[in-house]
Structures are given as C-alpha cells and as structure tokens.
Image: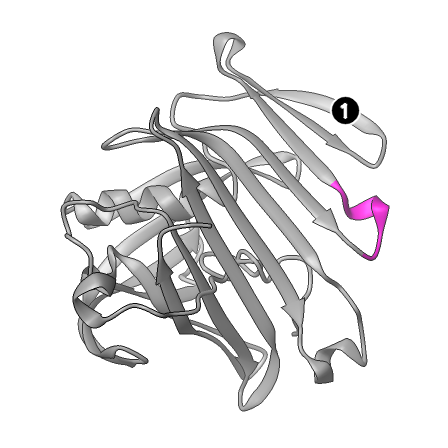
Amino acid sequence: MRARPGMANFLFHSRWLLAIGILLCANQLFADPGLVLEPFSATFSVKRNLIPLGELELKLSLNGTGDYTYHAHTMPGMLASLFSGDDILEESHGRISTDSIRPVRYHYRDEAGKAENTELAFDWSNAEVHTSSGGTTWSQPITPGTQDKLSQQLLVRLDLAHGRKEMAYQVADGGKIKQYRFRVEGEERIKTPYGRLDCLRVKRSKASQPPDYTIWFAAKLNYLPVKIERQRSGRTYRMVLDELREGSD
C-alpha cells in the first residue's frame, strides 16, 4: 500500500487519514469537550510496517450558520512516489448541527488522472444522490442520514461525543450505497505528540463483514482519531497523528 486514492479515507477506509501542524499551548489545544466539531487542521503520517508511505492533511472549516467544508489531501512520500505519483484531493461540503451531519456535495480528484475524478450531489428534497464520474452521471435513492466518505468521519466523532457505543451509517461510496459499522471495544491510553491520551478503541467493519480497521479516538482532542491500524496480507498499515492546529485559515 502507498499514499494513493483511498488513503485519504484511511480514517475509516483505505482512503482515510488526517493532518495537522501545531503552534498552540496545551490549554488551547485541548478544547472544551462540549464543543465537538471545531475548525482544525491536522497532519498524519502513514506507514506500512516501518516503511513511510506518505501523509494525509485534513482541514475542517465552519461558518456561523452551520455550513462546513472538510478537506483531505493525500500525498505520497518519496519512496511511494517512485512507484506512483498519486496526489489525491477530497472535499465534502454540507451542514452540521449538534447531533447530525448533512452532506450536500462531495468531490474526489486524482491529480494524476481525470478518469479518477468523481463528484456527488445530494438532492435531499428528492431523496437522491447524483454521481458524476468519467463523463457519466447517474442517480440513486438515499435515506435520511446518508453520508459521503468524508462526512461520516465527522459524524462518528459526534456520535462518540454523545456516548454512543455502536453506530451504522449508509454511505454513498464508489457509485453504491454501502453500510459502515463502528463499535467501541474499550479504552486505551495512546502515546501522541501531546502526551499520553485516553482514547476510545473502535472497530470498523463493512456491513456484516469482520472488522477491518481499529481506530483510537481521543476525547481531549474532541474525538479526533490519533491512530488507525489495518492488517492486510500479513502487513500492518498504520496512520498516526503528527501535528494538530486549532482553528482554520
């Protein structure tokens, strides 16, 4: 594996991951836990066993009316770029309330190939999502609460903050509606650049399949994941938080 399309979802999926840089003192970094989703930017490093693969940058911007922009940028490292130069941008736009996320638009772009460009438009009035990819557009029915691949990252943080232990989301992903499940397995103290933090250890699975990811969410960082692991073909893929910055530019 390398930093390629999909690694920006290495947070809950092979593309998921997050990124940050910090210039704040500790009492500013550890925000009020009652304010779950605040603007932030973050950087995560990704490795296969001990081999660096690249990094993911995540940035959440909010305005005063509840609109959000969630941006993920997956960048291959020097070693990974020898084999492929995939540079992936993903972006989700929508609205956030105290207990829900409603995506409106999602865009995925592979900087190296136009064929990998995909855009989703959520038509909530007609309960449909319109997907455009490779010059083709099609529509699918959706149910209330359906997410895109990035917005579900925000929703799981909200649900954990509200004390939920098991969650299941319908996600528009790859031209299909898929179900992703999250279950809190326990608590664990994880070493981070900001000291050892108490985390919820969460298993993620697709529909009824066995869990494929383990994710550690830190309550003091507003349930931001600080570590993600996946075992595949005898190899360990790991994403860890490097830096975090409150607020957005």
Disc 1 is placed on an element classified as: strand
- Can residue 207 be seen? no
Q: Which amino acid does label 1 sit on?
A: Thr
The vertical placement of 30 against 78, above or below, is: above
Q: Where is residue 109 in the image (x, y as percent from the top left)?
A: 72, 47
Q: Quadrant of the N terminus?
A: bottom right
Q: Which residue appears farthest toward the bottom when viewing the image?
A: 50
220 horizontally vs 136: left or right: left
Residue 115: say if magenta. yes
Q: Position of residue 63 (x, y in %)?
A: 39, 32
Q: Quadrant of residue 144?
A: top left
The residue stretch that appears in magenta? 112-117
141 horizontally vs 207: left or right: right
The vertical placement of 21 against 58, above or below, is: below
- Closest to the observer, 152 or 231: 152
Q: Which residue appears farthest toward the top when viewing the image?
A: 125
The vertical placement of 174 against 84, above or below, is: above
Q: Position of residue 224 (x, y in %)?
A: 32, 59
Q: Name the residue under label 1.
A: 137
Residue sitting at x 68%, y 34%: 119
- Can residue 33 be seen? yes
Residue sitting at x 53%, y 8%: 126
- Closest to the observer, 10 or 186: 10
Residue 65: say if magenta. no
Q: Quadrant of residue 122?
A: top right
Q: Where is residue 202 in the image (x, y as percent from the top left)?
A: 29, 61
The vertical placement of 173 against 213, above or below, is: above
Residue sitting at x 53%, y 38%: 92
Residue sitting at x 57%, y 71%: 55
Q: How many marks?
A: 1
Label 1 Cα neighbours within 10 Å, binned few <14 / some 14-19 / many ≥20: few
- Closest to the observer, 26 or 102: 26
